[in-house]
Image (cartoon, rainbow, N blue to C red):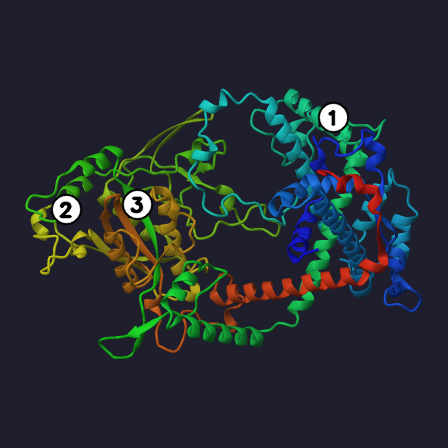
Amino acid sequence: MSRKKKAAAVAVAAVMTCSMLAGCDALTTSNVSKDYAQVVATVDLTRSEDFADGGEYAPYKDFISQVGIVKRDMVASYVASGYSIQQQYNWTYADVFNAIVESLVNRQIFVQYAKVYLAKNYKDENGNDYSLERYTQEVVNKNFPSPEAKEAAGLAFFLSPKEKDKADYDLKRSINSAIDSIEEGYIDLEEDEHDHTADSDVRTLPTGAETENEDYYTNDYQIYTGRERLNDLGEYEPVEGSTPTTRKKAYTRFLANLSANDLITAGENTSEFTSLTYYAMEQKSNYETALINKMSDKLEEEAKQKLDDDWAGKEFDALLQSQKDSYTNDASAFETAFDGMSDTSFILAAPQSVDPETGGKKYDSYGYVINILLPFSELQTQMLGEFSSDYGDEKGNSFAARTMLLGMIRATDQRGTWFTGHEDYSFEAGEDAYKGDGSIVRDRLFFENSFAKETENAKYETLKNYYGKYTYNGTVTETDGEYKLTPKKIGIADFLSEMEGYVKFAQYGDGQKLGFEMTPKFADYYDEEERVSYYDENGDVDYSKFVYATGKITGDDAFDPNKIFVAGSWENTAMSVINELSFAYNTDTAGLNTYLGYSISPDKTSYMAEFEYAAQEVCKEGAGSFAVVPTDYGWHIIYCTFSFADVVGTDGGAFKFVPEDIETEGSFSNLYFETLKSTTVSTYATNRQTEAINTYVDACSTIYTAKFQDLLDLGK
């Protein structure tokens, strides 16, 4: 098999839940039950010399037994992901089903290896050995309702109660989700369409908003069949419009789909879903995944023990030198990399130029800016396009006329659809929220779950780089779940007052306040005589004449790029405040969720000239600086989040690796070390997994190609 096909084969194995078969037509004979039950491959690691007398794993061989992979597993995997892989790589059916059976075999090899590896090298969550005597008592000699349930118990033996509960929670969520999808087809949404904004029109959410922690689980969660009382379902939330009748219909349809694919045995009690053989099959699959994840975590922990601060420091020094060699004299290569900087991919060095004042080298003003666009209305845009040139302007520009229109721009809070979409993200604000100047009642915030107090098993991730206390700027009336929103219309001066007020409201560290400075560029911006001319003495456009105001947000200390992503630092608080204002007002939606914002170089760019000038100027001034300028799109509030102009000295990069800061979450040293470590340990774990599979695949597995030859021949 080619390298590309081998890589795709791994992806095929990533999803193997039988629930994906629901609604799938049989791919083989009409005798589905008999055909799907055929064993197409077997895996048994005890056939290896490692399990013979005197072998490394001989004392642990009774933890495992031969596993048969049935044809049903192959079809389930094809429905789950094999079809998309087939289309992506233009594979034949033979290609994809050979890859599937190979991946299923590999999975079982690693599951069996994980059992004996854990038994040999680790203890359980109580600090006890994985006792073969206890395994025999709890699994081997115990009666179970089905072989699948017995296999699930054999896997659960190696999981902690938390790991088992997490796997069960994920399984129940998966089953409810499958039934939810069917139920939505029974619910009449026509009336609902008039009550809610279409999902496609809902304002972009901040990255991470209302995101459930991947490690979260609860035992207070049940599968809903339509027969249970809603109060007995725990944290499960029915789909909108659900009734017991629609749920029962969906559940019946779900069961029918399972029966059509021979996933329910005749005579089983379908009113108790968790007692079905199908549930045990799915539980077994989820426990396998949990065991694989546990084994991978153990391998990563082993790799981490070999990594230390000294190693990370040497890696940092090597990367810094490499970037200096690559970027300081090659602006093109630098700018390509600079576009992709984030909290997991840092740019340490930038091109340098000669400082005309000192003659020494300095970093050029490469930086990032958040752009908040307050736009012209459609009518104003039309008027702008119809303006003739200013009186006496030989170049045909209409700058003065545009300036008059700028005074008419009225921006509004763009977050209305966070109320009116199918998901209502709003909640009533407390006393610690920013509520404006008091001219209207403002009492709604968003994403309450994302700002909940962090606990050991917190359900939702904390929203980062978003301050979260800027109330909706408008009045909100709610009647029987329906909202009437009246956003307040504000001009540029009003917006800057909001910006200043919110910046001064925000706190960082131990109750410290941000500083806010702003300087209007002209006493009366809309008085053409204030500027005399939009051109310089050479007849070129003087873009400084368009700047409405400049300013800077500051903290008690000088800006430290190493703290940009440290929650509670002034650097991150300032960026988070501006980021939230961007979500509130910005109509340049491409600029939302871009980490640090748009990348800016000191050279000619493709941005509009007025924007380019102002963005380059704030990057020269450094992070925290902002400027307000117009273009033919409207007002732009341009805030610098990071700039190489802040870098002091000529021999170091923009960031410093400080071992003492590794434990400070969000610091450069922490993010760099975790990213570096993650890449290294993940590679180590993957290599160990591949090594284990390669060690046992030939001696311990058998594939019976004849049993699925009909699948290989499809399409011929």
Q: Residue at x 52, y 46 (%)?
A: 452
Amino acid identity at mark 1: Ala
Q: Nearer the viewer, residue 312 or 90?
A: 90
Sequence order check: which comes first, mark 2 or mark 3?
3
Q: Would you say the residues marked 1 and 2 are in contact, meaning their CB atoms lie under 8 Å apart?
A: no
Q: Nearer the viewer, residue 221 or 687?
A: 687
Place of residue 640 in the rendered image (x, y in percent of width and height, measured from the top left): 33, 58
Sequence order check: which comes first, mark 3 or mark 1?
1
Q: Is residue 512 left or right of residue 449?
A: left
Q: Nearer the viewer, residue 47 or 315?
A: 47
CA distance separating discs 1 and 2: 70 Å
Instruction: In the rendered structure, find residue 397 and report the number of the disc placed on it.
Output: 2
From the image, state whether disc 1 or disc 2 is nearer to you.
2
Classify 10 Å Cα crowding around label 1: few (below 14), some (14-19), many (20 and above): some
Q: Total of numbered circles in the picture?
A: 3
Check disc 1 and report the residue beneath it: 256
Instruction: In the rendered structure, find residue 373 and report the number of the disc placed on it.
Output: 3
Location of residue 418 (image quadrant): top left
From the image, state whether disc 2 or disc 3 is nearer to you.
2
The N terminus - image quarter: bottom right
Seen as rendered, the residue at the extreme front is: 716
Q: Residue at x 49, y 20 (%)?
A: 191
Using the rendered image of the protein, determine whether residue 613 is visible from the camera's viewpoint: yes
Place of residue 206 in the rendered image (x, y in percent of width and height, measured from the top left): 45, 46
Instruction: In the rendered structure, find residue 36 and report the number of the disc placed on it.
Output: none
Sequence order check: which comes first, mark 1 or mark 2?
1
Asked if residue 66 is positioned above or below residue 665 in the image, the reply reads above
CA distance separating discs 2 and 3: 22 Å
SS class, disc 1: helix
